[in-house]
Amino acid sequence: MSIHHERISIETKGDCDIIDITKSVENTVKKSKIQTGICTIFCTGSTGSITTIEFEGGLLEDFPVAMERIAPKNAVYQHHLRWHDGNGHSHIRASILGPSLTIPFLKGKLTLGTWQQIVFVDFDNRPRSRQLEVMIIGD
């Protein structure tokens, strides 16, 4: 068994910024030289998430609208009342989606579907510098 770790750094715009990180993750798997295993991508921080989506214009418009219905920006959040940072909705959204994703890979290739891309979603209410931890385990 082998283990490979890399960090992906990205700059975001905030406010439900959706960034396709598929190529970066694929390159990390390739660099690891591990042929079969799992790849986990983890976002440090409590206002960002990692998921898969079909990275196309319609869904890139639909996703923020759906998040606004689930956890509206203008709702009352105790987090905001306590810290006065205006990002209570960001924490709720990120908690629902989750901070990590694990994808199996075979013959050095991620087992993603044809229209499935890996994305980082920044729910915070301001631009951020983000660090994503990529851990690859396998043979």
Image (cartoon, grey):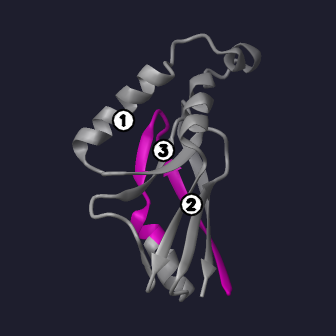
| Inter-mark Cα distance, 2 to 1 | 23 Å
Label number found at residue 26: none
Q: Position of residue 113 (x, y in %)?
A: 32, 63
- Label 1's element? helix
Q: Position of residue 131 (x, y in %)?
A: 62, 57
Return the residue at label 2: 9
Q: Is residue 17 above or below residue 138?
A: above
Return the residue at label 3: 121
Identify residue type, mark 1: Phe
| Inter-mark Cα distance, 3 to 2 | 14 Å
- Quadrant showing the C terminus: bottom right
Q: Position of residue 74 (x, y in %)?
A: 51, 13
Q: Are marks 1 and 3 in contact (CB under 8 Å)?
A: yes
Res 84 → quadrant: top right
> Residue, x 47% and y 83% (percent of image)?
30
Return the residue at label 1: 63
Residue range (magenta)? 1-25
Q: Position of residue 77 (x, y in %)?
A: 64, 15
> Residue, x 47% and y 50% (percent of image)?
51
